[in-house]
């Protein structure tokens, strides 16, 4: 295996799908994907906040969407409608699934039977353990970057760290 095969960095994106700041962070994530492509793995990590009533169900729905092969498309579609999620809850989660051609009935069943609870709970517990207190929060190269108050300069800092990691 050549060095280019192993030259990859990981960015954990601690997100809450009812968070308007996480929606605004999508532009930075798109720019990072465009710049690094497959060399930067961006992993969605769930951190539902108690103040948002439907965030926990949304995290579970995102996991079901991933099972059905539409993880980021679903996440982006839900984040684009954070206001609606606050008022419509699971109805919106199922409508987005239907709009993307996912099996909305299976999505509904997953929300009822809780098959993705452990993944969401594990993400949230890990986030708390490493000091995540709000969203969006990024972790790259062992460094935690909090975007909950301001995202100013965060993409540039992520790029600096990614460049360093990919050069190693």
Image (cartoon, rainbow, N blue to C red):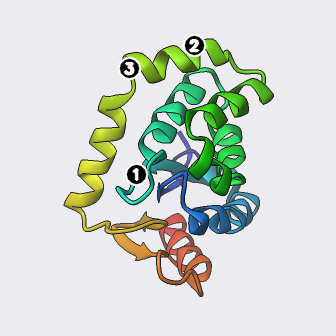
Q: Which residue is mark 3?
A: 115
Corner quadrant of residue 160: bottom right
Q: Secondary structure at mark 2?
A: helix
Of pointers 1 and 2, the one earlier in the residue sequence: 1
Query: Label 2 vs label 3: CA separation?
Result: 11 Å
Q: Secondary structure at mark 1?
A: loop
Query: Label 1 vs label 3: CA separation?
Result: 17 Å
In x, y percent, where is residue 42? 55, 52
Residue located farthest toward the left when viewing the structure as drawn: 129
Of pointers 2 and 3, the one earlier in the residue sequence: 2
Number of other residues with Cα within 10 Å of mark 1, as a class: few under 14, some 14 to 19, many 20 or more: many
Along the horizontal axis of the image, is 34 left or right of 132?
Answer: right
Q: Does any portion of residue 4 appear in the rendered image?
A: no
Corner quadrant of residue 35: bottom right
Asked whether the beta carbons under mark 1 and mark 3 sit within 8 Å of each other, the answer is no
64 lies above or below 157: above
In x, y percent, where is residue 67? 55, 22
**Label placed on residue 93:** none
Q: Which residue is mark 1?
A: 48
Q: Does any portion of residue 78 appear in the rendered image?
A: yes
Q: Secondary structure at mark 3?
A: loop
Residue at horizontal 62 percent and vertical 20 percent from the top: 68
Viewer-closest of 91 and 101: 91
Residue at horizontal 26 percent and vertical 51 percent from the top: 126
Viewer-closest of 2 and 37: 37
Residue at horizontal 66 percent and vertical 45 percent from the top: 78
Asked whether the beta carbons under mark 1 and mark 2 sit within 8 Å of each other, the answer is no
**Label placed on residue 106:** 2
122 lies above or below 52: above
Corner quadrant of residue 139: bottom left
Along the horizontal axis of the image, is 101 left or right of 75?
Answer: right
């Amino acid at each position: 295996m050549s060095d280019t095969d192993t030259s990859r960095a990981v960015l954990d994106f601690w997100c809450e799908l009812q968070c308007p700041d996480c929606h605004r962070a999508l532009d930075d994530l798109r720019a990072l994907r465009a710049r690094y492509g497959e060399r930067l793995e961006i992993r969605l990590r769930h951190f539902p906040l108690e103040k948002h009533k439907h965030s926990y169900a949304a995290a579970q729905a995102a996991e079901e969407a991933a099972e059905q092969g539409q993880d980021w498309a679903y996440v982006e579609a839900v984040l684009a409608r954070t206001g609606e999620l606050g008022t419509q809850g699971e109805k919106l989660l199922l409508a987005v699934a239907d709009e993307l051609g996912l099996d909305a009935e299976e999505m509904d069943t997953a929300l009822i039977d809780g098959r993705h609870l452990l993944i969401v709970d594990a993400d949230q517990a890990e986030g708390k353990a490493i000091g995540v207190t709000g969203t969006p929060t990024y972790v790259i190269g062992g460094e935690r970057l909090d975007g909950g108050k301001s995202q100013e300069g965060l993409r540039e800092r992520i790029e600096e760290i990614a460049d360093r990691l990919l050069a190693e």
